[in-house]
Image (spheres, rainbow, N blue to C red):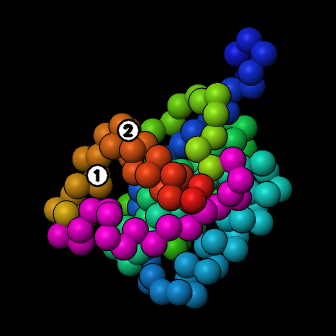
Amino acid sequence: MVLGDVPVLLQLFYTSRSFGYDQAVLSGILLDARRCNIRDGITGALICREDLYLQLLEGPAALVDACFERIRADDRHLDIRLIVRRPTETRLFPEWAMHHDPAVSWMWSADEVAAGTVERASAAEAEAVFRRVAQAAAG
């Protein structure tokens, strides 16, 4: 899709919980994501810890949708919830096939996650989280 002379990209935010989270599972997810995203022209970020995955995918609409369908079929993710799916003209993570952020102190607490804060997060709240991560990644 093209808007004027600017190609429109798709930006998709989702949340899920991990099944059997450990460093090996995380490494496998990041390896798979980076390999496929480089191939498909997708960029983004994965914020994760043992109780939370929050991911942003951005790129060509059909390829982002196909990526999300692969994630939905991946048994390493539980309770997947789409937060936002929208067109965008710019990427938040143009240099990252998949940036990893461990969400240590500035994210929701484990108690907040358990109480459903992530499920109630608005598109604006999720975007604000990723904007902070993008700023930190840029240096």
Q: Looking at this view, is 135 or 63 the one in front?
A: 135
| Quarter of the N terminus within the rendering | top right
Mark toward the viewer: 1 or 2: 2
The reply to whether residue 78 is in sight is no
Q: Is residue 93 above or below residue 7?
A: below
Tell me where residue 42 appears, x and y as whole percent: 71, 49
Tell me where residue 41 appears, x and y as whole percent: 78, 48
The residue sitting at 69% across, 47% down in the picture is: 94
Residue 97 colored magenta?
yes
Q: Is residue 137 left or right of residue 107?
A: right
Tell me where residue 104 appears, x and y as whole percent: 36, 73
Q: Is residue 85 above or below residue 110?
A: above
| Quarter of the C terminus within the rendering | bottom right
Q: Which image quarter: residue 3?
A: top right
Check residue 119 in the rendering and tell me which mark sits there, or answer none. Answer: 1
Q: Is residue 56 left or right of residue 97?
A: left
- In the image, the segment drawn in magenta is 94-111
**Residue hosting label 2:** 123
Q: Residues within 10 Å of mark 2 (few under 14, many from 20)?
A: some
Q: Is residue 31 left or right of residue 50?
A: right
Residue 89 colored magenta?
no
